[in-house]
Image (spheres, rainbow, N blue to C red):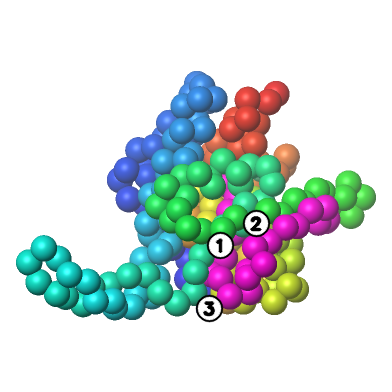
Amino acid sequence: MGKLVICDHPLIQHKLTFIRDKNTITKDFRELVGEVATLMAYEITREAPLEHTTIETPVAEMESAVLSGRMIGLVPILRAGLGMVDGILQLIPSAKVGHIGLYRNEETLQPVEYYINLPTDAQERMLIVIDPMLATGGSANAALSALKKRGCTHLKLMVLIAAPEGVEAVRSAHPDVDLYVAALDERLNEHGYIVPGLGDAGDRLFGTK
Ligand code: URA
């Protein structure tokens, strides 16, 4: 079973409080989401493989560590996932960025893929699927399935706030995927919003509505 990591560093908890607050303005919301994404990127890369290379310091030759092995790709789910990309790139500037777009079929209520664009070497990368909110898990599961269908096997999911229903759905459909969340909230309400959550992440990021 993949890991469920709650990234509850005090800095993340502090910033999340202001992200959740309905009085936080769009500019601050966007900046704070980016900052939490950076901090979560630190956690998600904790086990990134290293290799050694020989360098010379001004004093001596030494073997020193550099990142190796599988490189990293980011796959934000449109549109709210975009709000976390720059924050992660601050820490992993060489990551390639793919995109996946999903809409909800109003009859079946199932997510339908309308856009996907991945790095050409996506199959060789560790891909981090990004979405601020994990509500029912429908979009995350569809995104993970879309990546697996294209041969991507090393997948992680990064979300800011998760509902227990979403965590359960992802872990049962994709037990191989590690899940990183900044907060695990109480439940979903009858409109599909996470409680207490933060409202609509896309609208708050982009100032719509
Ligand atoms: N998507 C959001 O943006 N917010 C929620 O609470 C649930 C899904």
Foreground mark, 2 or 3? 2
The crowding category of the residue bearing disc 2, from other C-alpha atoms within 10 Å (few below 14, some 14 to 19, many at least 20), is some
Is 183 left, or right, of 67 in this rendering? right
Which residue is the site of mark 2?
A: 98
Q: Quick one: label 2 or label 3, which is nearer the N terminus? A: 3
Amino acid at pointer 1: Gly
Q: CA distance from mark 2 to mark 3?
A: 26 Å
Q: Give coordinates of residue 22: x percent, y percent.
A: 53, 25
| The residue at label 3 has a CB less than 8 Å from ligand 1 | no
The crowding category of the residue bearing disc 3, from other C-alpha atoms within 10 Å (few below 14, some 14 to 19, many at least 20), is few
Image quarter for residue 203? top right
Is 183 left, or right, of 103 in this rendering? left
Range of magenta residues? 110-134
Which residue is the site of mark 3?
A: 1
Which residue occupies 14% across, 74% down? 61
Amino acid at pointer 3: Met
Q: CA distance from mark 1 to mark 2?
A: 7 Å
Q: Are dots 1 and 2 in contact, CB under 8 Å? A: yes
Q: Quick one: label 1 or label 2, which is nearer the N terminus? A: 1
Q: Is residue 127 magenta?
A: yes
Is 25 left, or right, of 8 in this rendering? right
Q: Give coordinates of residue 46: x percent, y percent.
A: 36, 66
Total count of labels: 3
Which residue is the site of mark 1?
A: 73
